[in-house]
Image: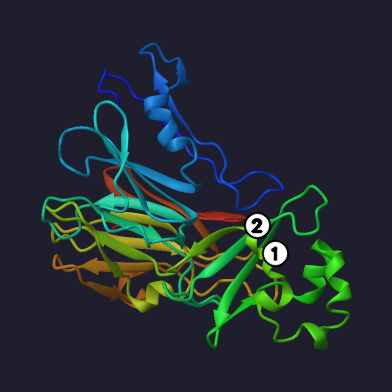
Amino acid sequence: ADYDRDGDIDLFIGSRSIPWQYGMTPESYLLQNDGRGFFSLADAAWNDAVSQIGMVTDAAWADIDRDGAADLVVVGEWMPVTVLRNTGQGWENITEAAGLARSNGFWNCLEIADLNGDGYPDLIAGNLGFNSKIRVSEEQPATLYISDFDRNGLLDPITAFYKGGQNYPLPLLKELLAQLPYLRERFPNNASYAGQTVSEVFTPEELEHATRNQVFTTASSVFYGSAAGRFTARELPREAQYSSVFAIEVLDANGDGKADLLLGGNFYGYTPQLGRQDASFGNLLEVDGEGGFAVIPPTQSGIFVRGQVRDITRLKVRGREVVILARNDAPAVVYQEQ
């Protein structure tokens, strides 16, 4: 988008992770176009606000406050849905003022559209979903502890989640010992490790120096904008939470002039103890204009896609609209309007 309003297109480059340092914030960049197609790092007033914004997986430009300037919305892993307002002189992080400070998720993708027709942009974000061993809430978040626990010069990320009111480490003992061999003295076998909480596995001193990233929601959600500048979260229907959502397309599926949603996802890369996510076959959601959704079954929508969907787009082919769903390790799937 043309964030500096000089008539050319500028770029935000979001970074997701640092090799061998998962959980630490990588460097992201705002690149300014000089009008001749050459890009350079924006000055500090603009770039500093985005350089350490988080583990970015997606971002989108939109005029959130309707002042004519392009604002920036960023999502990612272990971070909130983040809104940067374009002041004309730099970015103002309005995430907290927008009511999104506790929206940390495992966010995969983002789209922006006015779903309820009130004239204000709404944020549609894909998350992990509910069909997972990891269950979270604001009171009992998932936590990523990052520290050089064994003091070998390398950072060790340890994921933990709550179950039954207790905070347990996610790794199996063999996984933990492969990363932190010194713990073998504390836990020589599976029986000694079973049922141990994070505070029982690690000493207070070890945890004190750890960086902590947290996730408070795994729900794929819509955040409805308002005249007051605050967003109201609404979880997508349960059918959309059966698996992770990695792709969202806004379209008018039924010809009523209102925005509807087509979702795709799944993820096969988890360890066996978590199990692969493969319960999504694509979801078509009709939006009623009041903030609610109706799930259109595959028998009616015609959408039934196996595999790991990573992007959805629409094209005009010979005057007819087609929808293309791109998948990892599989051919794209194409649907044509009837």
Nearest the viewer among 139 and 72 is 139
Left or right: where does residue 26 sit relative to residue 292? right
Q: Secondary structure at mark 1?
A: helix
Tell me whether circle 2 and circle 1 mark residues in contact (CB < 8 Å): yes
The image position of residue 287, as x and y in percent, is 21, 66
Q: Is residue 193 visible?
A: yes
Nearest the viewer among 319 and 121 is 121
Nearest the viewer among 102 and 65 is 102
Instruction: Give the amino acid at mark 2.
Output: His
Q: Residue furthest front?
A: 205
Q: Residues within 10 Å of mark 2 (few under 14, many from 20)?
A: few
Compared to residue 294, the image places residue 213 above or below, namely: above
Q: Is residue 133 visible?
A: no
Q: Residues within 10 Å of mark 1 (few under 14, many from 20)?
A: few
Query: What is the image's colouring?
Result: rainbow
User: Which residue is disc 2 drawn over?
Assistant: 209
Query: Separation of disc 2 and disc 1 at Cα?
Result: 7 Å
User: Which residue is disc 1 drawn over?
Assistant: 205
Nearest the viewer among 225 and 296 is 225
- The image quadrant where one finds the N terminus is top left
- The image quarter containing residue 178 is bottom right
Q: Which residue is at 26% across, 43% downward?
A: 319
The image position of residue 272, as x and y in percent, is 70, 74
Q: Which residue is at 67% across, 69% downward?
A: 204
- The image quarter containing residue 164 is bottom right
Compared to residue 218, the image places residue 330 above or below, namely: above
Instruction: Give the amino acid at mark 1.
Output: Glu
